Amino acid sequence: MSIQAYRWVMKAVGQPMEREMFDPGAPGPGEVVVEVAGCGVCHTDLGFYYDGVRTNHPLPLTLGHEISGHVVAAGKGAGEWMRRAVIVPAMFQCGECDPCKRGKGTLCSNERMPGNDIDGGFATHIRVPARGLVAVDESRLRDVGLSLASVAVVADAVTTPYQAVLQSGLGPGDIAIVNGVGGVGGYCVQIARAMGATVVAIDVDPAKLKMIADYGAALTLNAREVDSREQKKRIAAFARERGLRPIEWTIFECSGTRVGQESAFSLLVRGGTLCVVGFTLDKVEVRLSNFMALHARALGNWGCLLKNYVPALDLVLEGKVKIAPFVEELPLDQINEVFQAAHDRRLVRRAVLVP
C-alpha cells in the first residue's frame, strides 16, 4: 500500500523546518500507519529545535511525540487496529527487556520515541508499532466536547504528570505543590486534585494562575511577587487554616527552569517528596544533605508506563481533567511560526498542529 503523505523535517538546529513529500511505507508485522489528527508542540521539541538537545536519530528528522489519529493501514498481527481512533504513546516500550518484564517499562532498554528515535508526528502520517497504542472511544470524546486532535496531548502532557502523581503516592489529605502550571503543570494540578489532594499552584504568569484557580488549585502564588521563603510561609499558613499536615508535602517541579528547580527544592519539608517532571539543560546547586536531614526524597519521571495510559485517558473522558481550555488547534503548515511563538512564550495554550 502506497500513501502519499507529507511531513515537516528538521535539518539543522534552529533552521526553518522544511515540508517534504514522503511515503510512510507499508507497515511490517506488528506495525500500523496512523493518519495524524493532531500533534502537540512540547517543551521537549523546543529543546531539540532551539537548544541543540541531541536526538537519538541523527538529523534530518521529523519531530513530534504527542500524536493522535486513525489507523489506515495495518501489518500482520495488527489488523484489529484498522480504522480505529488512537493515541500514539510518547514512548514505545518493548515489553521484552528485563525492566519491562519486571513492570518497570519507563526504564526500557529498547524504547523508541517518535520525534527522537524515529520520525515523529508533525506529518500527515506516521508508521509505528501497534504495541502500546491506546484506543479512543470517539463517542465518549463527543460527549465531553473534545476532538481527536486535542487529545493528542494525552500522549505526554497528561500521562507524564499522571505517572509522576501515581509514583509519588499522593492521595486524599495531602498537599500537592505544582511549580510551573504551563502545559504539563496545568494537567498535574488537575490530576493531583482528582486524586484527592489539596493543590497549591506556583507560576510567574498571572493569567495562568488565574486560569488554574478554576481547575483545581486551592491556592495560587506568583513567584515574581513572592520569593521561595515567603512561599513556604504562606503554604504553611494555608495548611494550618485547612487543617492539613505541615509535613510530607509533595512538590511537582514542572517549570523546567533553573530558578524553578531551586525554588522547588527550597520548599522541601520533613518527609517531603520532590518530583522532577520538567527538564532543563541548566545546572542547579543544592545541598543534598537536606534530603537526609528532612527524611525527604526526590523522584525523577521519564514518561509513563503504557498500562497507565488508559486510566489517564479515562480521567479526561470522565471530565475530571479538562483539556479543551488548555489547547489550541493550529494548522500544521504554520509549524515554524508556532514553534517561534512557543519559544517566545507568546502562546497561552498548548499548540496542537493539525494537518
Image: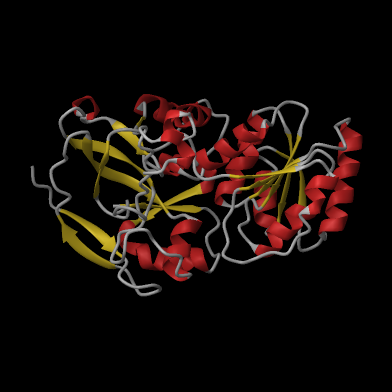
Across and down, in percent, residue 231 comes to 83, 53
Question: Does 195 sit left or right of 90 as displayed?
Answer: right
Residue 140 in which image quadrant: top left
Residue at the spot x=30%, y=52% of the render? 118
Tell me if residue 158 can be seen. Answer: no
Instruction: Name the colouring of the figure.
Output: secondary structure
Residue at the spot x=73%, y=64% of the render? 285
The single residue placed furthest to the left in the displayed view is 1
Residue at the spot x=49%, y=43% of the render? 303
Residue 147 in which image quadrant: top left
Across and down, in percent, residue 40 comes to 42, 50
Vertical placement of residue 287 versus 39, above or below: below
- In the image, 214 versus 81, the foreground residue is 81
Question: Does 1 sit left or right of 271 as displayed?
Answer: left
Tell me if residue 175 can be seen. Answer: yes
- In the image, 316 versus 166, the foreground residue is 166
Across and down, in percent, residue 82 comes to 20, 30
Across and down, in percent, residue 181 comes to 64, 50
- In the image, 138 versus 81, the foreground residue is 81
Position of the N terminus by quadrant: top left
Residue at the spot x=40%, y=68% of the render? 337
The single residue placed furthest to the bottom in the displayed view is 15
